[in-house]
Image (cartoon, rainbow, N blue to C red):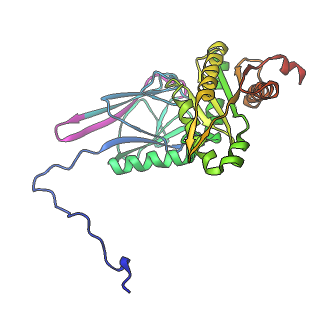
Amino acid sequence: MMDPLDKTICDRKLVPPANGARKAEQSIMLTIIGGNETDFGKHFILEKARTMLGRSKTADIPILDGKISKVHCEIAVSRSGTGIEQISIRDLDSTNGTYVNNESVSQVALKAGDKVQIGDTVLQLSYSDEIEKEYHAKLFNFAARDALTGLYNKRFMLNELENYSRIARRSGRALSIIMIDIDDFKQINDRFGHLSGDEYLKELAALILGSLRDQDIAGRIGGEEFLIVLPETAIDGAFRLAVRIRKNVEEFVLHYQNSAIRTTISAGVCQFENEIKDVKEFLDLADHAMYEAKKSEKNKVMQALFSTLADK
């Protein structure tokens, strides 16, 4: 019997471009290759004539690095009808300077392969086509996202929380978190099977994402445990959001293989204060509030009490 793979399948004809046809212009891409490990592979396409990099969230390319100035440097791209004419970078009187290929610069032309360092973050300039852009996006997602739910993974979430906590401590801006745990999740797996449990986790992740603003960050940090980081959000706003998510979950029904699956969540909410010494303590406070919600009656949201700090 003939092996079906012995014959090559031809599904398209390769037609050479017509004479004189101009090659499609490639994109200019900056890729993070050094600094914070969870940012490795993150890439940015330079589409504007001028792109500002800095620590401020209003920057065209915001980078959470404590050694980067809020307004750090600017990359200018000059284009003409024939393509890219010149790319240059200019330091914007940053505190720690801008470096290109390990040399301090005030303004200099850039070329493909150049490495730009601002703070502890190193970015490499390159040209890319659509396939390369898709590759870099997938590479970053493989490293930063939970494979089942598509939410960010624990490593990425803890790093983001560390960065935002540092900003909150320095600037006094509000920062809150929500810890969520699915009530009686083991019963779903035991009664309906693990595939149904996986499906429920995916649907819950979508439900959480649908409740958030663009700047909010959600991740899966355990089997059935989730963390939401809420920049510029005080405790009252975080509490209202947690209650809204709790109600949405309570009303949600997963129809799976002729079964109607429903459950609830318990959540703990905490706002960052300077009395909190580190991220671990911040998470412990939210986790303790979540545990109290589960211990009381489940399907409940509780706010962290700072008296628990004094009790330690």
Is residue 83 something that shows in the picture?
yes
Q: Which residue is at the front of the view, 199 or 308?
A: 199
Residue 139: in magenta span: no
- Circle count: 0
Q: Which residue is at the front of the view, 95 or 192?
A: 192
Q: Which residue is at the front of the view, 28 or 146?
A: 146
Point out residue 75 in the picture as x, y percentages from the top left corner.
37, 31
Which image quarter holds the N terminus?
bottom left
Which residue occupies the extreme front position in the image?
258
Point out residue 63 in the picture as x, y percentages from the top left corner.
52, 31
In screen coordinates, is 164 left or right of 140? Answer: right
Q: Residue at x 58, y 31 (%)?
A: 252
Is residue 65 something that shows in the picture?
no
Above-or-below relation of 145 to 236: below
Range shown magenta? 79-96
Q: Which residue is at the front of the view, 248 or 310?
A: 248
In screen coordinates, is 213 left or right of 240? Answer: left
Which residue occupies the extreme left position in the image?
19
Point out residue 262 in the picture as x, y percentages from the top left corner.
63, 35
In screen coordinates, is 238 left or right of 95? Answer: right
Q: Residue at x 31, y 78 (%)?
A: 7
Q: Quadrant of residue 77?
A: top left
Above-or-below relation of 95 to 100: above
Q: Quadrant of residue 283?
A: top right
